[in-house]
Amino acid sequence: MSGSVLLFCLLVIGVVAYWLGRLRARALAGPKLSSLHSRPSYYGGYVAVWSALPALLMLGVWLSVSPSLVQSVVRGGFPEEVLAAPQATQNLEYNMIRSLARGLTLLSPSEATSLVDGSGDVRALLSAKGVPVAGEPKPYMIPAAVELNRLSAISQWTMTGVVFLMAAIGLFFSLRAITPKLRARNRVEQVVLGGLILASSVAILTTVGIVASMLGEAARFFSMVPAHEFFFGTVWDPRFAAAGSGSSAGQFGLIPLLAGTLYIAIVAMVFAVPVGLFAAIYMAEYASSRLRSVVKPLLEVLAGIPTIVYGFFAMVTVGPFLRDLSGQLNGLVSGNYASFIQAQSVLTAGFVMGIMLIPFVSSLSDDVITAVPRAMRDGSLGLGATRSETVKRVILPSALPGIVGALLLTASRAIGETMIVVLAAGVAARMQINPFEPMTTITVKIVNQLTGDLEFTSPQTLVAFALGITLFVITLCLNVYALYIVRKYREQYE
């Protein structure tokens, strides 16, 4: 029985156990439910947890460990010349055996027997069943595929038996443990608390794992390339140097990439901040509730558009439009219709990224502005101030720390953007201040260095991890500073 079917069966067992627990608790209490320590639903939850949770944990462990054990047993039967081959070759051999094993399950018994005996055409039979086989299988592969199927079947049936046995044992003993004095609510809430702690730990451990993996690979990179050359270098050319240059690798200067990242992010914020902030002020202070209920969701639709769509929009529409517009303006002024704005440029990427960031600025700022107490607005208006004066002199100063924090969080979002920059800003790693020329960012070069069939043994690929950890530190510092600003300068209202 497959893992998905077993999971469904465990869910059904849990539902049945829940109702059995409720019924038993009601039967023990009789007409006087107040004699129970907990409500009947908690007794049902207690039985459901003990019936399904241990079996579910066993299922997860079995599905995680069993494939590795089966693979190690099958690989142990490889011929000596295969075991002496490199690990990559052994992986290719095992992948072909897995394809053969999958194909054997689709054959009839007579066809499978002919393959085992060596009298059948392996590739023809498997191709007829829709299972492609790369190359001619070696003589030992068919028996290995049969053994793989046998071990997998044994593992699945054993797993099914163990899981159902654990569920039955849990159901039996949990039903026996139900008494009117059983603290079922406490037990169930402890399980729920453990689930919440586990969910929180997953997020934390994932972050720790990401940082640890990047730090490990970045340390390998810095063992090949000095850190000062990376952090203070002004040339990005990660190709192998020419012969006789005295260096085995190219140049990995971070400064051009960092300059492009910050430049494009600043241009994006120039477009996003005024529009987003003014939209938030209008929605919070001037718009009617009916208009706000319609316009605000429409504005936030921009946040749901995939960034690749923004990239296509920049590459197909905005970039050519700015290029042609600059050519027309140049022609009107000087008679020369050469465009001074390139289709891929800092301006194109920053403008489209600014459009993408508008809902972030607007939503975060709107939440901060609406958090200002109504009494402050009414007091200002009661003293004779106009609505615009109230916004300028009362509401915005009160909400300023939160707005600054929102803008910093939005800036970290802009710094980490990839697809818009890939399609709209180009890949030129250079230092210049002309917004009409292409530049590139850290995220683009991470994509470039990790694209293709690569081995993580050279500085050309390992530099992506150094770039990643650098970008992580930058965004982390922005987020921490935003939280510091909000906590230090926010107003406390009763």
Image: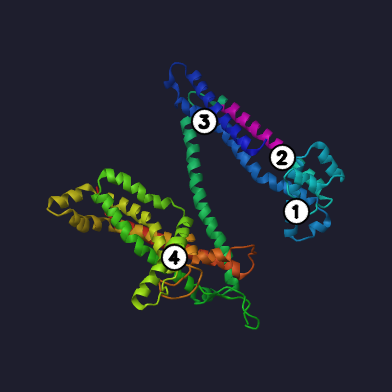
* Residue 197 location (% of width, % of height): 49, 44
The amino acid at mark 3 is Tyr
Q: Residue at x 62, y 63 (%)?
A: 452
Amino acid type at image mark 1: Ala
3D distance between C-alphas at marks 3 and 4: 64 Å
Q: Which residue is mark 1?
A: 134
User: Mark 4 vs mark 2: which is more N-terminal?
Assistant: 2
Q: Nearer the viewer, residue 494 or 396?
A: 396
Mark in the foreground, 4 or 2: 4
- What is the quadrant of the N terminus in the image? top right
Camera-side residue of 311 and 53: 311
Nearer the observer: mark 1 or 4; the answer is 4
Of the two numbered discs 1 and 3 on the same chain, state the one appearing first in sequence: 3
Tell me the residue that label 4 is attached to. Answer: 320
Residue at image mark 3: 46
Look at discs 2 and 1 and give the one toward the viewer: 1
Which range is magenta? 153-174
Display coloring: rainbow
Q: Quadrant of residue 390?
A: bottom left
Tell me which label, 3 or 4, sits earlier in the chain.
3
Mark earlier in primary sequence (2, 1): 1
Q: Residue at x 28, y 58 (%)?
A: 400
Location of residue 475 by image quarter: bottom left
Real-space Cα separation, disc 2 to disc 1, in angstroms: 28 Å
Q: Which residue is mark 2?
A: 155
Residue at 62 percent of width and 79 percent of height: 247
Give how far apart the Cα atoms at labels 2 and 3 are: 30 Å
Mark 2 residue element: helix
Q: What's under tag 2, amino acid-wise?
A: Ser
